[in-house]
Amino acid sequence: MTNLLPPEEQHRIEIMYLGRFIFIGGLALIITAFIAAILLAPNFIILAQSQAALEHKVIAPVSASSSIEKSDLLRAKTLLDVLSTTTVITRAPSKTIARVLSYKPAGVTINHIMYTNGSILLQGTAGHAAVDAYHRALSADPIFKTITVPVGSLVGNDQDFSITISGNI
């Protein structure tokens, strides 16, 4: 099948579609950058404020003149405690997960790792002997208080398994 448009018209249409493509691509990049800035702005502000507070060693007054100021100070302290805990937690899981994976014996394949509320869920594929060896290696580490392996993961040959680890994570 042949194109009935002359070559000049075909070229003009190609240029028009290329312009549309570039415009939409640029618009998508701008929108993505804007969304990323909106999502990262609160973290940046919190980090900047905590750095400024540490540098200047700002200390809240001990006695507030009214109950409203006292409640505001208490609320601010609570928020700072929550945010500082969140900051500490974001660093710890990567080291703990690396520690968990360092005990992985040969024959164990980890397909999925999920960290929630101080516990780690591992899902993968392995034989029952490898899962049992992994369970024993993890149990020997004092940082992990509870290692839970469903009974079904310890029976049979190569199959899916899950291990839930909790403790001082």
Image (cartoon, rainbow, N blue to C red):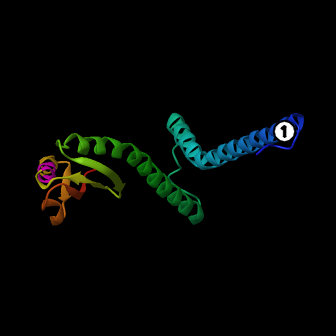
In the image, 134 versus 83, the foreground residue is: 134
Task: Give the extent of the magenta segment.
Answer: 130-135
Instruction: Tell me if residue 120 is in the magenta stretch.
Output: no
Residue 146 at x, y = what percent? 19, 58
- Dominant secondary structure, magenta: helix
- In the picture, measured across the screen, residue 114 lies left or right of residue 52, that is left
Residue 56 at x, y = what percent? 54, 35
For the point 17% across and 43% down, the residue is 105
151 versus 35 height, above or below: below
Residue 153 picture quarter: bottom left
26 versus 71 height, above or below: above
Residue 45 at x, y = what percent? 59, 44
Q: How many labels does the image show?
A: 1
The type of residue carrying mark 1 is Gln
In the image, 143 versus 21, the foreground residue is: 21
For the point 81% across and 43% down, the residue is 3
Residue 11 picture quarter: top right
For the point 35% across and 43% down, the residue is 94
Mark 1 lies on residue = 10
- In the picture, measured across the screen, residue 94 lies left or right of residue 12, that is left
The residue at the far front in this view is: 1
* Label 1: which secondary element: helix
Residue 88 at x, y = what percent? 39, 45
- In the picture, measured across the screen, residue 94 lies left or right of residue 1, that is left
Q: How crowded is mark 1: few (under 14 residues within 10 Å), some or many (20 or more)?
A: few
In the image, 16 versus 60, the foreground residue is: 16
